[in-house]
Amino acid sequence: MKAFIIYDEEGNVYAVRYGENQYIPNELRGLYQEVPEGALIEGVAVSDPDNHKILFTPSKENILEKELAVVKAQLAYISMMSNIDIEGV
């Protein structure tokens, strides 16, 4: 998913438009960059004048999926090391 973002010199976001081939007007600063599906856009990093970047937080669902995968891996390891089947728990 691509996002077109209108922001100021401090990185404050004023508008976001999603979709392909967004027009960037000359009077505004705009950035067209790939962001993960469901991400929450927080602003634009403007510290490097030649390389502005979108600041975003991954969706809560993505974070929970990663945490669940870690817990499942830990349970599998404990199960393997203890010879106890805890998969059904």
Image (spheres, grey):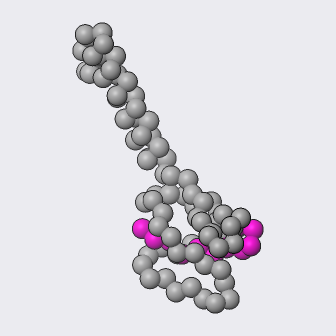
- The reply, left or right, for residue 37 in relation to residue 47 is left
Look at the image and say whether residue 48 sits in the magenta stretch. Answer: no
- Count up the numbered dots: 0
Q: Height in image: 57 above or below 35?
A: above
Look at the image and say whether residue 6 sits in the magenta stretch. Answer: yes
- Quarter-of-image position of residue 25: bottom right
Q: Most extreme residue toward the bottom, as rendered?
A: 26
Magenta range is 1-11
Q: Height in image: 64 above or below 87?
A: below
- Quarter-of-image position of residue 72: top left
Q: Height in image: 26 above or below 86?
A: below
Instruction: Give the residue at x 25% y 10%.
Output: 83
Tell me residue 40's x, y (percent): 55, 58
Tell me residue 44's x, y (percent): 64, 65
Tell me residue 47's x, y (percent): 71, 64
Quarter the N terminus occupies: bottom left
Quarter the C terminus occupies: top left
Q: Most extreme residue toward the right, as rendered?
A: 10
Tell me residue 34's x, y (percent): 47, 67
Of 73 and 37, nearer the camera is 73
Instruction: Give the residue at x 34% y 16%.
Output: 78
- The reply, left or right, for residue 28 in relation to residue 2 is right
State whether residue 87 appears in this view.
yes
- The reply, left or right, for residue 61 in relation to residue 30 is left
Of 16 and 70, nearer the camera is 70
State whether residue 15 appears in this view.
no
- The reply, left or right, for residue 43 in relation to residue 63 is right
